[in-house]
Image: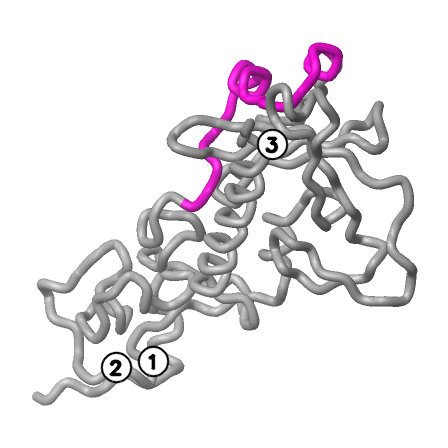
Amino acid sequence: MRSRSPNRSNVRSRGCPVRAPWRGRRVCSWSSPRTTRRPVASDATPCAGRCWWRTGAVRSARSAPPGCRDAPRVGGEAYGDRTVKPLTEADIRSSFVNATPDELAQLPIPGLHETLWDEREFLGWRDPQAARRGYIVSWIDERPVGIVVRSAGGSLRPGIAAMCSFCHSPQPATQVRLFSAARAGESGRNGNTIGTYICEDLGCPMLIRTAPPHLNPPATIAMRGASLLQRVQNFTADITKTA
């Protein structure tokens, strides 16, 4: 007896157990229009063995359907290590290259236990006790490097658009602020600083992930995250130059 090809109504409940996050639907089984052959027993996996990607139609991790357990995580192994590694309070306090002793003594530590490390290209936060002060910590050459930044007193004119120089996200001008950072070493103590426009809350990693998922798929977020991290590292490298 010839086996009957499954229809969409039968397959929907038997599909890949991972749900597409933006539609609440199961990521594809035989119902995918890209399926060209039936799965075979050797293809059976925890992904039910029926997902078109797992049956051999596509084997590249970059091409796995969004939501599939083999789809690339943002900052995950498929794209290399693009996220900030978990940090401890000791790591953070010892990482700053341009902080004064008083600033280090007053340094507030954010809620590290609440941080989604695999969704952070850098750790950035504002000081609740010093309104114009902020902190950025990223990994460079396998070590954490932190910088203290200070926002300008005034903000951009309301009603115009602005763009963060780190994440390149267009947004209202009131959400972008000019920040400056003192150079490391004697140069910074002599008053030399570098300035750039950054998201006011230093929340660039969250911002690049807030667009609707169908407009911001994992591959796009990964590329934006890699560019974001590179710009942060370049800015930090300029700060650490002492000559």
- 3 or 2: tag closer to the N-terminus: 2
Q: Is residue 227 magenta?
A: no
Quarter where residue 63 is shown: bottom left
Residue annotated with mark 3: 114
- Above or below for 32 versus 47: below
> Horizontal and vertical percent for residue 194?
68, 39
Q: CA distance from mark 1 to mark 3?
A: 37 Å
Quarter where residue 39 is shown: bottom left
Mark on residue 32?
A: 1
Q: CA distance from mark 3 to mark 2?
A: 40 Å
**Image quadrant for the C terminus?**
top right
- Name the amino acid, label 1: Ser
Q: Nearer the viewer, residue 116 or 34?
A: 116
In this orientation, does residue 122 appear?
Answer: yes
Q: Nearer the viewer, residue 242 or 118?
A: 242
Q: Is residue 181 left or right of residue 172?
A: left
Residue annotated with mark 2: 35
Tell me the SS state at disc 3. Answer: helix
> Horizontal and vertical percent for residue 2?
10, 89
Q: Check contact, mark 3 vs mark 2: CB within 8 A.
A: no
Task: Please give the name of the residue rendered at 91% of the width and 59% of the height, measured from the top-left corner.
Answer: 157
**Image quadrant for the N terminus?**
bottom left
Q: Check contact, mark 1 vs mark 3: CB within 8 A.
A: no
Task: Please give the name of the residue rendered at 54% of the width and 14% of the height, measured from the top-left corner.
Answer: 90
- How many badges with numbers are in the image? 3
